[in-house]
Image: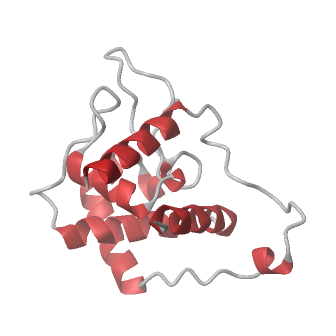
Amino acid sequence: MRNLKLQILASLLAGLALTGCDDAPSGSSGAADAEAAPLDRKLDTTQVARGKAVYEKHCMECHGVGGKGQPGDWRVRDAEGMFPPPPLDDSAHAWHHPTAALLEVIRDGSPQGQGKMPAWKGKLSEQDMQDVVAYIKSLWSDPVYRLWWKMEQQSLEP
């Protein structure tokens, strides 16, 4: 468990350090027909709707309407040396992290010295946190979701 937490923390820190982190895939890259086919994300629409409600109540103030973030550059530290809240759509780095890492940041807050994200453990239920993550995933374009899905599957391998 400790190794998993260290791996997740390392993934989060690496994601924040990536300068091209906000570059989502765009356009056609000559991918195979399977890559261009409509994507069945298998997201539960009821869960996504619940997650949207939780997001709008607790997350939108910082992460913006539809996860689009706030004006300004989320990659530049503020006067206190902290990163501002990033967008959670596919224009920033949330999609670079496996589900377990996204849930950990929601539960425990920003890694120390990185941002001002509060810990939601004890304030939101585990189901609320899982619902929010489902909603965030619903904001990602198909090309980004495909890349995330491949990364997610690799994170689950032993």
Does 63 appear above or below 80?
Answer: below
156 vs 83, nearest the viewer: 156
| Residue at the image position 48 percent from the left and 66 percent from the top | 137
Q: Report the residue that reaches farthest toward the top.
A: 79
| Residue at the image position 76 percent from the left and 81 percent from the top | 37
- Measuring from the top left, give residue 24's x and y in whole percent: 67, 51
In the image, 66: left or right of 6?
right
Q: In this rendering, does residue 135 appear at all? A: yes
Q: Quadrant of residue 85?
A: top left
The N terminus is located in which quarter? bottom left
The total number of labels drawn is 0
| Residue at the image position 34 percent from the left and 44 percent from the top | 6
Q: Quadrant of residue 151?
A: bottom right
Q: In this rendering, does residue 71 appear at all? A: no
Does 127 appear above or below 10?
Answer: below
Q: Report the residue that reaches farthest toward the front.
A: 158
